[in-house]
Amino acid sequence: MAQLKVRIQSLHWKNIRSFDKLDAPGLDGEIHNSFPTNGGIYLQMPNNTGKTTTLNLLRSVFTGKIPEETNEWRRIVVAENTESMLNDSSEFSARLLINDESFRIKLLLDHEGGDHRFFTAGPRGDQQGWHPPPSFRRAFEGRRELVELFIFDAETAREMKTKTNRNLLSSAIREFGGYSQIHDMIGEMNSTGGFEGGRLETIKSELEDEIGSLNDEGEDSGRQQSWNNCLNAVRRVRSELFDGIQARPGVTQMQESLEKSNSRMVEIDTRLSEIETDYGRTLDNVQPLQDTIDNLKTKYRTETEKLLESLLDPINTFDSSWHEIRDFHCRHQDANLPADVGKGWLLKLAEEDICICGTPFDDEMRLHIIEHGDQHLDRQKMVSVSEMQSEFKNLEHSNRDSIITASDLVTRTGNHLGEKTTEYETLFLTESSDEIAEERDNLNREKFDLTIKIRDLKHFLEVRTTNNMEWLRGEGLDTGINSTGQPTTSVGTIQTVENLNILERIESNLLGLLAGSREEGDIWKGLLLARSVLGMAVTKLNDELRRDISNEATSIWRSMPAAGSERNLRLQIEDDGMSFYRGAGDPMKAVSGAQSVSACYSIALAISRLGHISIPSVSDTPFAGFDQAMVTKWYETISGSWDQYMLLINTAEKKLLGNLCHEDYCASLHQTDMSSDGGRKFIFDTDFDLFKSLLGSNDTLGGDD
Amino acid sequence: MPFSFSHDARKFFNRIGVKATPANDGASKTGKLDTMFDAYWLCAQIGIQKDSFQPEEGAPMIVNKFVGASAKYMHKIRGVAFYQYCKRKGLISAEQGVLDEMSMFFSDESKELNTAGYSMLNGYAHGGFQLIYERLGEHCVELADFLLDYQEMLHGD
């Protein structure tokens, strides 16, 4: 198993927004002090001091990725009551203890020249660039979505629903599950489920060049030249399928569009949920009505499932002809056994000491069975016929009552639901403003259109990328594979292929044919086989671990207050993101802010446990939507689960925490004065009385900076 | 020859929702079908009951075994289908010939049929779907609505 232990020792700001120069913890002369490596670190930062900025900078330090937009991080100064930003370089650094060795990673932002860069100071000296140890690099380099699970705020927690998908988990599992070196060899899974990159890709490319290049002396046969033409067509079509052509979008555009549509869907659901909470559920007598509607929806679904079940059973649907069908089968049933199974059974019976009727066997009886057994067997009779006939013999009566009862219940429940929904809508329209009613209507319309768009995009992406050949065949989209299952070797057919996996099979087949006609055949086959076998093994392992992580995260999530207060909630990491379920029903449209935040903790913890890694959790304004009871439960779970966790909280959240954090490391970053450059001056203070008494006039539980 | 179902029929039932399809993105909020085979059997039942048999050449296969929620009624489905098969051949009252037809219709492979079995059920599934489509058109998305209409069709004239 991979081992990675990370602790945050200290944070340092210079010329960043409100901070001219600040060290947390403060320095003793030139000597650095460090945060405790275990337990909670509560940094109280009133709103508008830079909590979100700090979080973003810390993410950059972890990912080694320089942010695209850095202007907003310039130092803010005030001259003649007007705020402006300085162009002086900004610096942010974090001292990290990585596997017990101390590293200082500094991000220098050159606002004037745009020459932003990292510096790393570690046990082996100072280096320009981002150079943490390999285990840290492999885990986090460029993986902002993964880092956002450990270092998050309420906003990223909301977005995690779509970001925490199969790909994110795959990369996390790969690193923390301890088999990253296999991927170094076979590469990464691409969007079609195949593997590309890695050391095998280099060998494959070299072989491809060798196999695919026409013989210089013009010795290639017509067939070889035709295969080469096909290969060129494959490469052209692949590029079109990926990047699109004219009005036909490629995989890349479709994925981008899907991502945007999913994000918009989250926004719509969140807003609709807010409207529901603010204008719907707060009204007197609305909550019971809403509960009735929810219950009726569940009942409607259950009754529909019962109706379906009764309609699938022929004994209910063929009531008028059942007796004829039964008579027919009984007439053709005899007492004989199908010879295939009966012969062996009779011979075995003859070897027993006692007959199935309880009589002890003697030799005469045994001989009789062996000599006359065939008279009770039917060589033509099939087991399936025998089973069918036996079943009909036992089914005497048929009637349609269960169907009639089930359909009556579905009709009545549907009508009742319609009445209650109309009642709710009338109440909502009466009590809310015209603007809100209009906004809600518009959002619902947009949601309807977006649902269709997302469904279409998913379908087109599935067509383009799936490796489910059975489904493609069923949909008539398996162009490129002929009726015997062989990939095409026709340029004309290749140009009409819609699926990237089929294209890959065609290419592989062509390269195999070319290799077979030359000297590289065996090497080529061996290479593809090795990659395929290893690829299948890690994919299977990955899927299993993904399920384990979903289960582990659900169990952690349920132990936390926000999700634990509702029964039967579970989360599941799926191909296109995370889904939340209540019981066995469809995915929930949205969860509360508090539930999103706790889901972030749960997933991050489940991932950590997978690889026995120990990484700090850092969160900004994490108590949005929490009440006192929830915070107490939250504290128990978090303090017992994370080795080191850091919270950037405002004064309102500090108040909500009460005495809970008094045994932990508590400090305040607060303004004392104005700095000589005209900006605010902050100090870092571990005075506990100050921590308790500090007030921020803009602070609320939602946070706003 | 396996169980086959036309593109139009698949599109119709995918709009409602079939859990076992890769996308599973049907719009019904009142439930979904387990498998496309369940949809196929619902169509075949209507086809048999209303004697609407329409062979559809080239319809893609869905599966070659009994699957989904219908699988537990496999023996009854086989029995009903074989009875209908013999009825079409005028063998219901015949003393001879039924055993021979069994070998054409049934298979010894668990959960499968033989060529004549597949062929007959495919024709009724397609014929049944045509009746459903004529009545419900392209805009049915709720499983509850579909089943209520289906039940009326089944027991109506």
Image: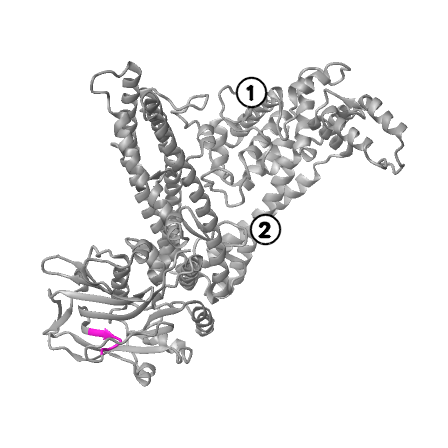
Residue where numbered disc 1 is placed:
B54
Q: Which residues are drawn in magenta?
A: A22-27
Query: Considering only vertical position in the picture, is B34 above or below A299?
Result: above
Using the image as rendered, state which of residue A105 and residue A619 is in the foreground: A105
In this rendering, position of residue B103 left or right of residue A108: right
Image height of A57 relative to A35, above or below: above
Q: Residues within 10 Å of mark 1 (few under 14, many from 20)?
A: some
Determine if residue A267 is in view: yes
> What colouring style does the render use?
one colour
Of B6 and B102, nearer the camera is B102
Question: Would you name the residue on which mark 2 appears?
Answer: A299
Pinpoint the chain carrying mark 2: A
Residue A413 belongs to magenta span? no
Element type at mark 1: loop
Q: Nearer the viewer, residue A432 or A638?
A: A638
Name the residue type under label 2.
Answer: Lys
- Residue A84, image x, y percentages: 12, 67
- Position of residue B154 relative to residue A482, above or below, is below
